[in-house]
Image: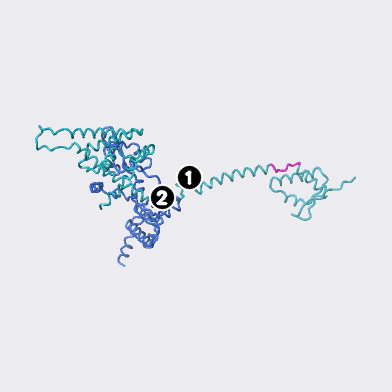
Chain colours: A cyan, B blue
Amino acid sequence: MQEQPEQFTFDFHKEKAEIVRQSGDELSIKMGDFAGPLDLLLYLIKQERADIFDIPIARITERYLEFIKLMKRLDIAVAADFLVMAATLIEIKSKMLLPRDPTLPIEEEFEDPRQELVNQLLEYEKFKSAAGMLHERATIEQAIYTRGRIETDDANEEVDATVFDLLTVFQKIAERHKDQVQMQIEREEISLSDMIKDLKRRLFAHGEVSLLRVFEEMSNKRELVTAFIAVLEIVRTEHVRLTQASTFGDIVLRKVEQAA
Amino acid sequence: MAEEEVEALTEPELPESEVEPRPARSPSDLVSVAEALIFVADEPISTKMLADVLAEPKEAITAAIEQLQADYLERNSGLQVREVAGGWQIATRTELHEDVRAFLKTRPSAKLSIASLETLAVIAYKQPVTVPEILEIRGVQSATSIKTLLDKRLIVAKGRKEAVGRPIQYGTSKEFLVQFGLKDLSELPSIEDFEDLTQGM
């Protein structure tokens, strides 16, 4: 299990190393990914090959401040949290330099000024490793694919219509179509005078007209009625005769030769 | 025979079943229909939901899924049935990712920054957790990371803490489980395990 920590933190260490080597804008971009003062501190401790439980505070503080100066020189806005850590380090360093208070009873436990920082670093390091674990999980997860979304009513609003919606739309279209048809009929409607003229023309051209044929030509009731009235009108005004060969047989409209 | 008799006797006494009588599914039919439903579901589908939809006992569903997994393994399928975010999902096998990726012409999508991953780790292990509590552990303001994580729907606000200022508490979402391939939060290794690891370095 000794290999495990290396695996978890490898990517992070590599990126940290790059931060130091790179310069200019590149660094400022990498700095955005920099996880914070504790992260930097851990990095410096590892670089110095120091023991986290016995941090050479003077050396580490020096390196830390160098780093802050580098950031400033490269015109990187140093986050306040980095400065807070710098102040903490200096405070610990000065405390370490002070001799132990001789008035304190011997049996009282000597408190290391570094202790709080060490605790914080250890706690932080756990979550840093956990972050590495999450990174690894996400990477593995990206090698697994599920199927694409299936088109459903929920997934695609454009086909969000039921059969009934379709019927409603169809009815509206049919309604509109019906209106158009009705208008066409009216437009094609033959007036009584036109009907009379047409019948007269046929009568004079052929001498006789089969009424059965005339009525059969009519496409609707209205035209039939018009034709019927036209026949009556012609019978009234013209010299014609209506003859029927047999009961319920065809009626022929025949021109009557006028006696001179 | 005895069992049949008992059933025949008790059946009329049952309250009128609101479910229409349906021909009983054979175990292999159940495996098929479970596979079909897991396949069409957009999100991992839970055993309970499968049981409800199919009107079958949960144990039968569990057995069917186990059978399905065994079938996939046995014929060396390119697919796997996996448990994620409290449900079942059919997905391609990890080792086929190169060919799948080449076909789909995709690349691994943008990863989270180290800062965001750390923030996510703190939230995952300490939830529900407030912004000041995250700051305490990470030693750095995490506002940008929290916004990123909220945008990616990996974390959600989980009420307010009964403390001064009533700060918002954050926790991980179902999406977090899906994206990190976790059955549930208990599948995360214990945070104390990381202590052992880091001290071993």
Q: Nearer the viewer, residue B140 or B180?
A: B140
| Numbered label attached to residue A157 | 1
Q: Position of residue A36 (x, y in %)?
A: 30, 38
The residue to which callout 2 is attached is B42
Q: Nearer the viewer, residue A2 or A66?
A: A66
Q: Is residue B156 visible?
A: no
Looking at the rendering, the stretch of residues picked out in magenta corresponds to: A187-193
Q: Nearer the viewer, mark 1 or mark 2?
A: 2
Using the image, determine if residue A87 lies above or below residue A226.
above
Element carrying mark 1? helix
Task: Categorize mark 1 by other alpha carbons within 10 Å: few (<14), some (14-19), many (20+).
Answer: few
Q: Nearer the viewer, residue A11 or B144?
A: A11
**Mark 1 → mark 2, Cα distance in angstroms:** 16 Å
Q: Position of residue A177 (x, y in %)?
A: 61, 44
Q: Position of residue A237 (x, y in %)?
A: 81, 42
Q: Amino acid at mark 2?
A: Asp
Using the image, determine if residue B16 lies above or below residue B199.
below
Q: Quadrant of the C terminus of chain A?
A: top right
